[in-house]
Amino acid sequence: MGRGRFVEAATYEGSEKVSGVIVGPEELEIHIVARYPLPRPIPDIAESIRERVAPEAGGRKTTVVVEDVEVAADENL
Amino acid sequence: MKIFNRIAMILLLAGLFVLGIYMIVYAFELFGYRLGSLPFSGFSDGLQGFASDVEQGSLAVIPLILLVLLVFLGLLLLLAELKPPAPSRVRMGNGTYTTRRVVEDEVSAVADEVPGVLGSSVNAKAQRRPGALVDLEGRVRRGDDVGPIKSGLRSRVQEHLSRRGLPVSKLNVKLVEADPRQTKARVQ
């Protein structure tokens, strides 16, 4: 999950903090970081996340933001 | 426009602060300053003269030009204020966005691999419509034939971005000659 670039992307509920998700009354924003090698084009990955999450969003407008694309750490190193 | 507003507000508030101090000094006749010594009569006479000139339609040329300029300035500021701010994220599709940095990193990574390009700098701007506006500046060795390098760079970047699925509405490629000692790579 992304953490936001200039403003923290997180939702606080009770004593819990969920990073990478901003839940508003009308809108739901999901921040992700894609990782190489990419299995599909970036918009396809974002769209599939949006399609998976939208039914659980309670009618909120769902937005997916790809914050960064990073190289995965090599586990053999 | 945000910066302009901020500067205008700082100047306005600073002016009000200074005027407020003057008002206190003159109102309480501090340090020997008195309200009676202020040249209010000349100012009010000038203002009255100006108002009567406006009413009679006999304004001089310079005040008329100044008033017209003032109207245009006000119109420009109003339009600039009404113009919506540029979006900060690059729109990919319906409800999907990416940051400008992702586009810049992807373009920069592939540009640096193009033969003949010793280094690059990228600036991506988000738009209301899908796709980013990308300005790419590639640095090449002095004396190199820039035509093939430019077309190769453009096609490689477009191909890479379409493979990644990052939409670009416009790609501006510019090549500049650079000293290899000051570029990212000396040989490509």
Image (cartoon, rainbow, N blue to C red):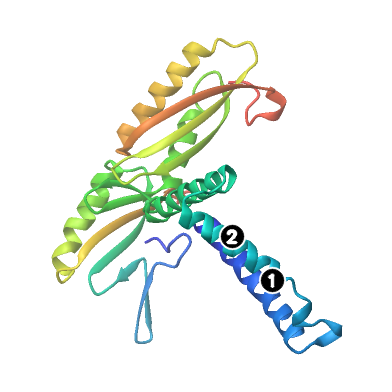
Q: Position of residue B149 (x, y in %)?
A: 49, 16
In this view, the residue in front, B155 or B88, is B88
Q: Of B23 and A48, which appears nearest the observer?
A: B23
Q: Residue furthest right?
A: B32
Residue with the mark numbered 2: B49
Residue B170: quadrant of the picture: top left
The quadrant in which the N terminus of chain A is found is bottom left
Can residue A77 be seen in this snapshot? no
Q: What is the three-letter code of the residue carrying label 1? A: Ser
Q: Residue at x 40, y 37 (%)?
A: B133
What amino acid is at disc 2? Gly
Q: Disc 2 versus disc 1: distance between alpha carbons?
A: 12 Å
Residue B88 marker: none
Query: Circle 2: is it few (<14), some (14-19), or many (20+) Cα within 10 Å?
Result: few
At 53% from the left edge and 13% from the top edge, which residue is drawn? B146
Secondary structure found at label 2: helix
Image coordinates of residue B86 in percent, x first then y, are 40, 50
Where, by quadrant of the figure, is residue B169 drawn?
A: top left
